[in-house]
Amino acid sequence: MTGASVPSKRNPSSTSSAEVKVTAAKGRPMLSWVGKRPLRRVKAFPAQHVETFDPSGDAATRSGEVWADWPSAYPRGGLLFHGDNKEVLAHLLANGFRGKVDLIYIDPPFDSGADYVRRVSLRGHKGAAKLDGESYTLGEQIQYEDIWANDNYLQFMYERLLLLRELLRPGGVLYLHLDTNRSYVLRSVLDEVFGLDGFRNEVIWQRTTAHSDTRGRFGEIHDVLLCYSTGTAPTFHPAHVDYSEEYRESHYSLVEPGSGRRYRLGDMTAPGPRPNLEYEWRGVKPPAGRCWAVNIDRMSKYEAEGRLVYSATGMPQYKRYLDEMAGVPIQDVWTDIPPVNPMAGEKLGFPTQKPEGLLERLTRVSSDRGDLVLDAFVGSGTTSSVAQRLGRRWIGCDINKGAIQTTSKRLQDVIDAQLADGQEALIEDQAPAPPAQLSFSTWRVNDYDLQIQHNEAVNLACEHLGVERTRTDRFFDGTLGKSLVKITPFTHPLSPADLEEVRTELEARPEEDRNVVVVCLGIEIAAQAWLEDWNRLRRGKNTINRIDPIELRTDERYGSFMAHEPATAKVGISRADGIIRVAIEDFISPSIFKRLAEQTGVVRPKIDDWRAMVDSVMIDTSYDGKVFDINLSDVPERKTDLVEGSYELPMPKRRKKTMVAVKITDMLGEEVLVTKQV
């Protein structure tokens, strides 16, 4: 693979307020459910640029009409977002993508189960642990069991469909992929969001062959694709499938000597009279009431090309070659695209992975080269991968870090292959065309890694709050309205020591009469008391130097700003008698606990065995600090199995000392690397 994924600190500035307005749904009929509420506004959080893959420096050279209105804050390439898709869609709306997406494909959860955006899968038999105050096992809470109320599912989908509609351009197309359990209700939701005029098709995709159903009903072998658009003239390129062998034999039974091409004969007359088509050809005239189908110049052309065959009476007939026919126009029942074969090269281990052939058809039919394709449930990255290969621009997002990692690797492979092919995407039935881009970048939305330079954390906070930066002030970071703003380091909660620094700075500026806003993540109890004491004498209309905090995670106006807490592990690594012993004593993934806590019905998630959070353990007994060589890999075959946790490996030969590295990956794809020299 050429080109490395490199970290970046680029961060787009929001082009609108922190809240995004959403147009109300006005379509009929309107489905009702308990707790239904319109989505009038949604909070938009900033994006943190995490990584860039641009092995050829492509982003800086991209130009042309399709990139003319691309938001300047983003590099000209694919965009992969890690975050809750509701928050990612709001971010896109606030940052220049409203009305610019040409095609949307989404494959959300089919069954009730759980909020896909907060999905977590744990290892262990039946979830391994019980939740306090709940009768369900932890596994049942998070693995698509029928415990998530239908009403919550409908609200979840309703909000996201409203946001997706705002992103579509006039004439843009959306495909919603479902099974029979939810398609009938979500069609009503789509009618409300897009209006009845927005409906285009209900496509039936046969995803498997016939089988017996032991539940006393017909076997379910199809999914449903609901297609809606935002305009009266959506992009649509008719697609065709090959004729059946029976049809070829019966309708194209003639074979041309020499070339071996199959053909059929077509009538060269048409209903008349039409003066310019009434002439004598090789001494023959059309029958009464009819004329020739083409003018004499076209007839002569066909003659010169050998396309005419003459009957015994001298009547010309036209050769229609089978290999020139497009095939049978595709209708709304698709039986020719198989599911992902377990043995296929594209199989990536995602249970809901869809075949590339399905996405290729949708992309070709409903978009043009250079169009922008969006998938808000990116999963294994099939949509983005197909869009990259077919010369489209693309945006993908997912809450699951493992999905982001899988998609990133898949796209890197596609781009590397395109670069190796001379920057041409060779598409089966189309002429070679340059890819829309040969790079992509990865971003976080509201799940920020704040273990970074303070300046970058300040930029994120200022963008979120709408702070106007003051680059010339050595202490304060900017202004919010008429107040000065100080952003304290996010590595610790606001403390009295931080506030004393603000007091000292104000005392050094005796003419400064503005109030101060202190931005933080968390507030110590002692700091609360300090603030109450400071502000006790600073009340009233004309007060000066009042200090008010904004706690980014809980403030009613600006709350829900999420800092990413990395997973941690306690690992014992020792050596004795030529044996290296590794014992994982504990593992904690704050991200998993956070996702569980945010799911409907979950109260104080408790995991009795840390191994339920671990997907795999890998060990390198001679780690060089750069390349991780796997000497032991513990990846349980079944989801009900747990990693061992304790391991013994031989000491590398001819080594007095060695660096042992243990890589632990959780069920969200986050990695922890622990090293020790023994």
Image (cartoon, rainbow, N blue to C red):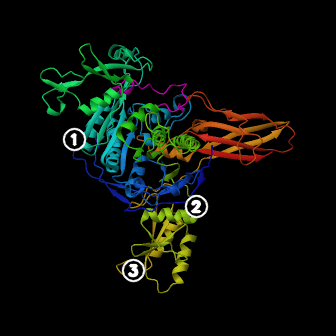
Q: Is residue 595 left or right of residue 7?
A: left
Q: CA distance from mark 2 to mark 3?
A: 31 Å
Which of these two is toward me, 348 or 184?
348
Residue 188 placement: quadrant? top left
Classify mark 2: residues with Cα within 10 Å, few (<14), some (14-19) or many (20+): few
Q: Is residue 241 left or right of residue 49?
A: left
Q: Secondary structure at mark 1?
A: helix
Q: Position of residue 82 (x, y in %)?
A: 49, 48
Whether 588 is drawn above or below 579: the answer is below
Q: Secondary structure at mark 2?
A: loop
Q: Secondary structure at mark 3?
A: loop
For image coordinates 27% across by 21% down, the residue present is: 317
Query: Is 337 inside the magenta-drawn segment?
Result: yes
Does the magenta stretch mainly form a helix, a strand or a loop?
loop
For image coordinates 82% across by 37% down, the residue present is: 651
Q: Considering the image in quadrants, where does the C terminus appear?
A: top right
Classify mark 3: residues with Cα within 10 Å, few (<14), some (14-19) or many (20+): few
- First in sequence: mark 3 vs mark 1: 1
Q: Is residue 74 left or right of residue 294?
A: right
Q: Which mark is residue 197?
A: 1
Magenta-highlighted residues? 323-351
- First in sequence: mark 2 vs mark 3: 2
Which of these two is toward me, 305 or 42?
305
Q: Which mark is residue 491?
A: 2
For image coordinates 49% across by 30% down, the residue present is: 351
Which of these two is toward me, 564 or 229?
229
Per the image, the residue denoted by label 3 is 543
Q: CA distance from mark 3 to mark 1?
A: 58 Å
Q: CA distance from mark 2 to mark 1?
A: 52 Å
Q: Given the image, on which type of amino acid does mark 2 rest?
A: Thr
Q: Position of residue 467 (x, y in %)?
A: 44, 69
- First in sequence: mark 2 vs mark 1: 1
